Image: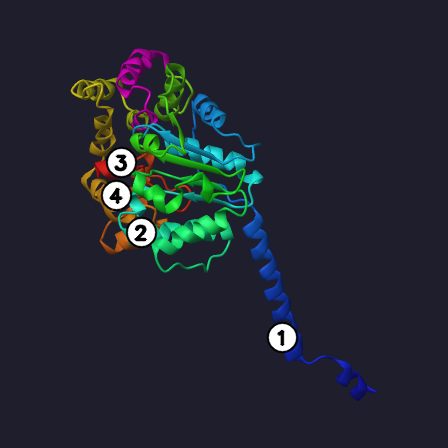
Amino acid sequence: MASTSNSQRPSSSSSKSKWRSEYKFIGHIIGEIRILIPKSVHVGENIVGIDENLKQVKLLIDAKSDEVSMVGIYGIGGIGTTTIAKVIINDMLDQFKHHSFLENVREGSKDDHGLLQLQEKLLRDILMDKTMKLHNVDEGIKMIKSKCSLGKVLIVLDDVDCPRKLKFLADSLKWFGGGSIIIVTTRNKRFLYVNKAYSSYETKELEKNKAWELFSLNSFQLNHPADSYVDLCNRVLHHAKGLPLALVLLGSFLFQRGKEEWESTLDRLKTIPIDDIQKVLPISYDGVDDRCKKVFLDIACFFKDWGEKTVTGILEGCRFHPKIELKVLDERCLISNSDGFVRMHDSLQEMG
């Protein structure tokens, strides 16, 4: 009887094989579900004052139409064009099965190899196929035309600097299926005029009450300043001219500083022409020690958008102390690393 019972019991190797098969099947299903779940893009914290800009951009987009919408958002570095585009794509993700957000097109497309990688990234996102490979940019154009014209897609091309780039990524209404939305952010409004497929919107600086709130969140961690600092805040806002990046940088730099340090900073701001607000950006950089400056420059030149763990390991190998140096740079808003990657605004990278 025992012998019969043992013969009916499945072998250990058979059980393991069945378990592995089920494990792989479950893993495959989980992978497919993850692909279908919309992946939002990281926006950041303390997003203030973009409602009016969002409203105006959305007026150029007819999300319920079967027509293709192609919109260009332009403005100077640090004005918030990328933030607006990120909020829009996050708001609309649930309406699109096929979508792609291409960051830093200007930086990533300095040659044909870079353009080829961007084309591959776009098609992998749209087709949900991580293995998709292209041989050259001409093949990429043909693939984008053929695949993106089959249905509606949502695509954001961030920081495009010249018309040539669009010819390889999103040149015409005819490339895309009905209901598609294509958004481009740029500092160069001229090429939006050249490419007549795109309607355009100029990003406006923050209104005074919103600039006040954003600056206060960074300088006092409140949505309003301390009473004894109101006059000083007004003077800083006069120089920041409603530029969100300048408000964040100056606010972070002045956080927990005394009035004498505020006055010293304002004296320095007096030497900067009001119409040259980009020169405000180095103030936070100048306020950190030499080792932090070196780490900042390394990130600007080599490590932007790299994984934080990788950057930390490399910097430790160069005898830096990145846990504190990255923390200081993050506190000054010269970098951000809240999503596991070391991020830096394009205007700050150019300054570096």
- Sequence order check: which comes first, mark 2 or mark 4? 2
Examine the residues drawn in magenta and state their main secondary structure.
Answer: helix
Picture coordinates of residue 7, whole percent (x, y): 76, 85
Determine whether the residue tagged by mark 4 lies in a helix, strand or loop: helix
Question: What distance separates the C-alpha of mark 4 from that of mark 1?
Answer: 50 Å
Residue linked to disc 3:
348
Q: Which residues are magenta?
A: 226-249
Residue linked to disc 4:
300
* 2 vs 4, front mark: 2
Q: Closer to the camera, 149 or 73?
A: 149
Check contact, mark 2 vs mark 4: CB within 8 A. no
Q: Closer to the camera, 80 or 136?
A: 136
Question: What distance separates the C-alpha of mark 3 from that of mark 4?
Answer: 8 Å
- Sequence order check: which comes first, mark 3 or mark 4? 4
Residue linked to disc 1:
17
Question: What distance separates the C-alpha of mark 3 from that of mark 2?
Answer: 22 Å
Identify the amino acid type marked 2: Gly
Q: Is residue 205 left or right of residue 263?
A: right
Check contact, mark 3 vs mark 4: CB within 8 A. yes
237 inside magenta stretch = yes
Can residue 203 be seen here? yes
Picture coordinates of residue 184, whole percent (x, y): 39, 36
